[in-house]
Image (spheres, rainbow, N blue to C red):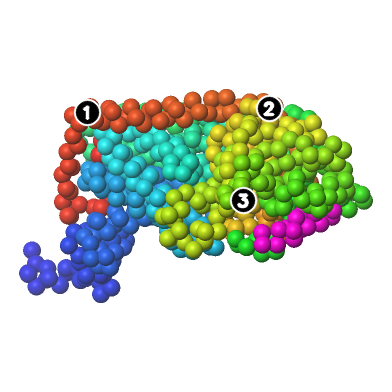
């Protein structure tokens, strides 16, 4: 045995670059743990928090950023699964309290919504953007709180997913008629689970992603219990049981996706499918300038769409473009009411005569109930036929708060100088269906496409084609791409071709399998003419979508009730782990 001096000489010397130890720091015992130690220790020094707390708070922010990357423009669909796997781990840690779950959820929500909704502040200022993001962040906060409450109920990944689905439903209804933007399923247009939208709608798609991420965490924890060297036969058997149920459910989910996918694949390719073929054109005339002043030159916006339609007609004659049976103009293509303005009506009639096809015209009309003292408007899509003149119309039934009307004006006028510029639109009525050239067309005008009930109502009324006329001139390209993703989920959900026509873009024709058959650039005058098929089949989502959502909400309520009964209407504070424990330790929570 050597001397003390020899032992001292052989002892490892500290690395000169090693950060100073912080109370509660991670012990470095291996390459990955050493890396985690460096990161968490530096976070702790920067934030002044214990290393474990700094690491978990940073992880909560990371989960929100990961979910954001699953949406356009990045479209990393898989990042949503990773996000909920990490969030699930944070919420089932024994150290996480009810208040901690609320805090993690709010951090997750802010990290997700702040970058997702940046386009909302481009033309109206920072405060409205921050206010909207904070309001949206409340819902993930409630999810974190309730998730900690139900994590002791067996099968926690199922209940976590149901809770998320229930809160997405609540967010789509409250406040101010709801704000479904950021629904998890809308970020899955490039992912393999997209066909699930045809089985249970976008709510089922969202729940599947959340469930898959949380199940990944549950299986990882169970494997950690079962690994060789773990002690206790009962513990290892419990771990196997914990893996078995999630594994079976995962297999069933992938089986359902596989069964749904071939049916949706009928839409691949321009004009393929089983229905009657027609050619549809979408006209994107663009606007003089983006922003809330886009309609200051309303006649010029109308002229732009007239000119682009005439260019389409000119290209049809030599065969550079196909003769459309139907032309779709965007929302607000005519902010001049063509029913009262003879000049606007004459220009629209000239465009329809040149293209030899009816046009769906997005126009603003005065409401019949409007007065000089209290003006009110309808956002309408009207059919003009070159043979029979004006026909059926769809008056936008779900209108946009802060964009088309101002709720609580006494409050919100203090948040933005743009509040006084908001028009006063009123909601229309009807099934969202018009007929043009004998084609039953479902219309979801811009904001309406976010809400499950709008396109479903149209399809149940007989729509064989879906149109989304939209005005993106007050937003940017990122918003347009996000809205295009929403329209894509609707195509799959209802097995219908969807034609998106935007004033400034992005316009597109989307097949029932989610593929874009054609699209324009952003803020560039253009037209699209594409063969499509009229579809009549009703998907399970169309038939029973609200029932599926009701079941998900019911499952969430049942889980909360079960948790209350299990805890005797009280939730004990969990014991705090030792400061020396790893912040990313997979200490088994509740199996």
In what quadrant of the picture does the N terminus appear?
bottom left
Q: Nearer the viewer, residue 160 or 534?
A: 534
Residue 243: horizontal and vertical position, in percent? 35, 32
Q: Find out whether residue 268 is within the magenta segment.
A: no
Q: Residue furthest right?
A: 318
Mark 1 or 2, nearer chain start: 2
Taking the image as shown, residue 488 lies to the left or right of residue 569, namely right
Question: How far is disc 1 from disc 3 in space, using C-alphas?
Answer: 61 Å
Residue drawn at (42%, 38%) of the image: 170
Question: How far is disc 1 from disc 2 in space, using C-alphas?
Answer: 48 Å
Q: Which residue is mark 2?
A: 462
Task: Kindly indicate whether the residue at mark 2 contacts the one at mark 1 (C-beta within 8 angstroms).
Answer: no
> Of discs 1 and 2, which sits in the foreground?
2
Which element is circle 1 on? Answer: helix
Circle 1 residues within 10 Å: few <14, some 14–19, many ≥20: some
In what quadrant of the picture does the C terminus appear?
top left
Circle 3 residues within 10 Å: few <14, some 14–19, many ≥20: few
Q: Find out whether residue 296 is within the magenta segment.
A: yes
Q: Which residue is mark 1?
A: 566
The quarter holding residue 30 reads bottom left
């Amino acid at each position: 045995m050597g001397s003390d001096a020899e032992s001292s000489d052989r002892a490892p010397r500290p690395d000169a670059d090693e950060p100073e130890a912080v109370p509660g720091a991670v012990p470095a015992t291996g390459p990955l743990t050493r890396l985690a130690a460096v990161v968490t220790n530096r976070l702790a020094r920067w934030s002044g928090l214990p290393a474990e707390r700094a690491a978990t708070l940073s992880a909560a922010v990371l989960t929100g950023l990961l979910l954001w990357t699953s949406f356009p423009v990045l479209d990393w669909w898989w990042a949503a699964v990773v996000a909920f796997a990490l969030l699930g781990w944070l919420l089932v840690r024994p150290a996480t309290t009810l208040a901690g779950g609320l805090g993690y959820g709010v951090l997750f929500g802010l990290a997700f919504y702040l970058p997702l909704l940046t386009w909302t502040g481009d033309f109206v200022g920072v405060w409205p953007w921050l206010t909207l993001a904070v309001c949206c962040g409340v819902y993930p906060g409630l999810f974190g709180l309730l998730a900690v409450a139900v994590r002791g109920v067996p099968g926690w990944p199922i209940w976590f997913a149901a809770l998320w689905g229930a809160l997405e439903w609540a967010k789509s209804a409250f406040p101010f008629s709801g704000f479904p933007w950021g629904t998890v399923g809308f970020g899955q247009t490039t992912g393999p689970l997209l066909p699930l939208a045809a089985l249970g709608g976008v709510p089922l798609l969202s729940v599947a992603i959340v469930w898959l991420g949380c199940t990944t965490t549950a299986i990882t924890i169970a494997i950690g219990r079962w690994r060789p060297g773990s002690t206790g036969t009962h513990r290892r058997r419990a771990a196997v049981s914990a893996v078995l149920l999630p594994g079976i459910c995962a297999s069933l989910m992938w089986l359902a996706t596989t069964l749904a996918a071939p049916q949706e694949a009928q839409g691949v390719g321009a004009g393929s499918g089983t229905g009657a073929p027609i050619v549809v054109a979408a006209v994107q005339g663009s606007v003089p300038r983006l922003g809330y002043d886009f309609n200051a030159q309303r006649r010029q916006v109308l002229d732009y769409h007239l000119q682009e339609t005439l260019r389409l007609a000119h290209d049809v004659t030599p065969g550079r473009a196909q003769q459309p049976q139907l032309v779709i103009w965007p929302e607000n293509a005519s902010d001049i009411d063509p029913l009262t303005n003879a000049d606007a009506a004459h220009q629209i009639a000239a465009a329809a005569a040149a293209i030899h096809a009816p046009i769906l015209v997005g126009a603003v009309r005065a409401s019949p109930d409007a007065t000089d003292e209290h003006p009110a408007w309808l956002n309408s899509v009207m059919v003009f036929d070159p043979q029979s003149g004006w026909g059926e119309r769809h008056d936008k039934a779900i209108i946009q708060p802060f964009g088309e009307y101002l709720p609580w004006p006494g409050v919100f006028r203090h948040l933005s100088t743009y509040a006084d510029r908001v028009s006063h639109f009123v909601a229309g009525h009807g099934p969202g269906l018009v007929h043009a050239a004998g084609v039953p067309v479902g219309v979801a005008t811009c904001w309406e496409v976010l809400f499950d009930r709008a396109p479903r109502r149209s399809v149940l009324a007989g729509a064989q084609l879906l149109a989304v006329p939209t005005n993106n001139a007050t937003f940017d390209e990122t918003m347009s791409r996000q809205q295009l993703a929403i329209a894509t989920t609707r195509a799959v959900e209802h097995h219908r071709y969807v034609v998106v026509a935007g004033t400034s873009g992005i316009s597109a024709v989307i097949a029932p399998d989610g593929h874009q058959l054609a699209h324009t650039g952003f803020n560039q005058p253009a037209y699209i003419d594409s063969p499509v098929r009229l579809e009549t089949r009703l998907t399970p989502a169309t038939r029973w979508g609200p029932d599926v959502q009701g079941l998900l909400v019911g499952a969430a309520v049942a889980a909360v009730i079960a948790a209350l009964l299990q805890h005797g209407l009280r939730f004990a504070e969990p014991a705090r782990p030792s400061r020396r424990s790893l912040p990313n330790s997979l200490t088994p929570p509740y199996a």
